[in-house]
Image (spheres, rainbow, N blue to C red):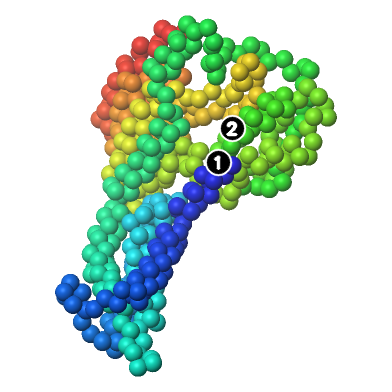
Amino acid sequence: MKTRLLNFWESLRTSFWFVPALMVCCAVAASFFLIATDRSTELKPHRIFGFFYEVGPEGARMVLSTIATSMITVAGVVFSITIVALTLASSQFGPRMLRNFMKDKGNQTVLGMFISTFIYCLLVLRAVHTSGGEDFVPNLSVTFALILSLTNVGVLIYFIHHISASIQAEQVVASVYHELDAHIDLFFPQTLSDNEDANSEGKNSENNNCDTPNEPPLDISHYHGHTIRSDQSGYLQAIDDATLFDIAKENDLIIRLPYRPGCFVSLGSCLFAIMSKDKGAVDDELQTSISNALILGSHRTPEQDIEFTVNQLVEIAVRALSPGINDPFTALACIDRLGTALCRLSNRAFPSANLYDDEYNLRVITKPITFAGITNAAFDQIRQYGLSSVAVSIRLMETLTSIANQATDKEQYEAIKRQAEMTRRASESSFSEENDIADIKQRYQACMDALSRFENDS
């Protein structure tokens, strides 16, 4: 349930309507509250209220009508500017970047301010009347409308600055990296030193509750296999690991997931496999319960997919290297950010693919995410599309050297070495200038020197 709620919240916060809708609801509530306050207290337009407003019913109607008309006009202009910004972002940075602009709280709040002010003025306008020989002017409500209109002037100035800054390449790259940085802390919270300390404490304790024990060979000869195929196609957006673990433990099962979040599931392909000791233990109700723990959608989301954000930076870099845009500096900025992220990941403990219960019985087998996989996702396409740019190849090699200096195990060594060798070979076959090739070879050697400490490791 928690995973589904988080998935629903992700769809809400990336929508362009949610925050404006909340603000409109607040405006409706504020209008009824302030009108009721005006009716009960009968405030007169003197002292502080007279500073803002001191007119009769017709003047109040004119003020409210003017504010409402102005706000809906400005809201239309703001919406038009936002659409133009989205179009520019889609063409320059890629259509997947629209999500980042749509979830921007600044854009959502600005649009919500103008629309909610418009709705507020309409609701207050209907309360102004002269019927029955008695005039009623909600002074407090009209004063609040004037305060909102003055506030919206500042909001409009903020919006013009914000939208101008948000479509700059450096700002776009930085915002994507900040999201990637947050996902590293979320998906890989333990550093290698923390993991080693935890393992050391577990070995010295009487009750060793380590989640990843030394795995004995799994004997599945006495298990019955059940393959459950997908009845729809789409991207696997999220997996409720806790629910799967509880189901497997309660029913004495082993559940194997061939896909991880971000993978595309084809119609009729194996969605998950179940191994049970009792051939009749797997019924339709159990299959439905397991299927409900897997969330499929029409597009990828970063909810549990760190490669989604990596691919966003890669897409920006690849588009910057295209002949139509030809902006290698943006590509270099993306490489720098990807290198920083991989340096952080080199010191993080990757979660195990297998989940065990308290008795060390295997319950869930997942498709793991690896350092090598993230490294390939980060650099493969940039290297392939950047063959014509010496600066990109040099920066790739320098970034790999920086990662090599912080590498901690043999897997990272193999992944970095593979990328460095491919970059060197691609450069030698693509560039004709000897000095350019010599520069790349020099940086390649620096990378190999940084990796030399792993050469003698078993």
Q: Amino acid at mark 2?
A: Ala
User: Which residue matches tag 2?
Assistant: 242
The residue most toward the bottom is: 133
Identify the mark nearer the N-term, 1 or 2: 1
The foreground one among 206 and 267 is 206
Task: Say which quarter of the image contains residue 225.
Answer: top right
Residue 455 visible in the picture: yes
Residues packed near mark 1 inside 10 Å, few (<14), some (14 to 19) or many (20 plus) = few
How far across and how far down the image is residue 239, in percent?
58, 37
Q: Is residue 77 above or below residue 165?
A: below
**Residue 79 appears anywhere in the view:** no
- Most foreground residue, 450 or 292: 292
Location of residue 405 in the rendering, given as x and y in whole percent from the top left corner? 32, 20
Question: What is the quadrant of residue 27 in the picture?
Answer: bottom left
Which residue appears farthest toward the right when viewing the image? 280
Q: Are dots 1 and 2 in contact, CB under 8 Å? A: yes
- Most foreground residue, 95 or 332: 95
Residue found at x 38% / y 46%: 316
> Element at badge 2?
helix
Residue 323 horizontal side relative to residue 162, left or right: right
> Residue, x 30% and y 32% (percent of image)?
394
- Residue 39's tag is none
Residue type at tag 1: Lys
* Viewer-side residue, 179 vs 25: 25
At x 59% / y 42%, what residue is drawn? 1
Q: CA distance from mark 1 to mark 2?
A: 9 Å
Percent across and percent down for residue 357 are 62, 21
Residue occupying the point 74% across, 36% down: 286
